[in-house]
Image (cartoon, grey):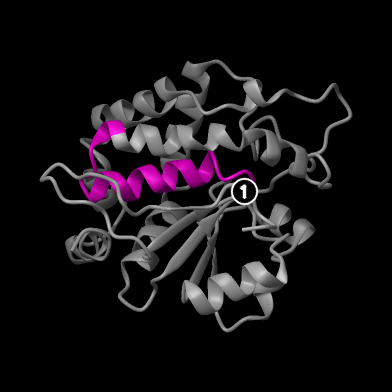
Amino acid sequence: MTGCDNVRDLGGLPTADGSLTRYGVFLRADSVQTATEDDVILLRDTYGLRTVIDLRAKEEALREGRGPLEFEAIAYHHLSFLPGEWVMPDDPRYPAIVRDQDSADRVEHYLNYLRRAEDAVAQALRVLAHPAAGPALFHCAAGKDRTGVLAAMILSIAEVDRAAIIDDYTRTNERIERVNSRLADRPSYNRSAVPLTPGQLSCRPEVMSGFLEGVDAEWGGAAAWARQAGVSDGDLRALRSALVG
């Protein structure tokens, strides 16, 4: 896509039983607010997009806007992973984009999405589990933190191989420089201080590994977390079936 830098399909990933996840079911993305006309045609007509889930904070989404997909007949769900009021342009309590934190702090930040935004995470899983939702796209700003956590939860529930989940997370590093450059021009993310380097924004494999281990330790795994958050077994089966069959 021309107007977005961090979009990819969750298809083609190996599962524990030797299957591969299906292409054309779920897309993960950075913000689609700058999608071009050609991007819209690709998503609407070629991909057949039916649903968008926006994980940005309320204030973030209002200030930045939804972009041209707002004017398409595509279902839109705003499910913020940042709880409460978000202070612009950046809130040290709930940063929109994880920046220059050590790996342990990043792991805790990711786990806090599940602790503090439980309802939003659970509802995102329910929406994606609905048969009429797909093909679906979910996004935040950079497509690495909030989007990365939701992708990891979906893939874990679908019993995707853990190494593949970590690899999918770190693939953002291939385009983090472009993401960083684009967000630097946006009012919600530009900073007056010395700009951070792509390395300070990178997706470290030990962070996703630590997050998944934390989910196991605290809740007994992604599916167990989802059940405790009110996601039904039927929705979990539907989510797996949509992605794996």
Q: Is residue 36 visible?
A: yes
Residue 233 among those drawn in magenta: no
Residue 55 lies in quadrant: bottom right
- Depicted 192 relative to depicted 82: above or below: above
Residue 142 lies in quadrant: top right
Residue 153 among those drawn in magenta: yes
Q: Is residue 90 visible?
A: no
Give the residue at the far bottom of this rendering.
Answer: 73
Q: Quadrant of the C terminus?
A: bottom left
Kind of residue at disc 1: Gly
The residue indicated by pointer 1 is 84
The location of residue 182, given as percent across then percent down, is 76, 44
Please, what is the dominant secondary structure of the magenta stretch? helix
The location of residue 242, given as percent across then percent down, is 26, 65
Q: Quadrant of the N terminus?
A: bottom right
Residue 210 lies in quadrant: top left
Taking depth in this image into account, of 170 and 241 the one nearest to the observer is: 170
User: Residue at 70% across / 57% down in the picture?
Assistant: 3
Element assignment for label 1: loop
The location of residue 38, given as percent across then percent down, is 67, 70
User: Residue at 38% across / 33% down in the picture?
Assistant: 167
Taking depth in this image into account, of 42 and 92 the one nearest to the observer is: 42
User: Residue at 55% across / 54% down in the picture?
Assistant: 139
The location of residue 22, given as percent across then percent down, is 28, 60
Give the residue at the far right of this rendering.
Answer: 192
Start-end of magenta stretch:
141-163
Query: Relative to residue 165, is residue 113 drawn left or right?
Result: right
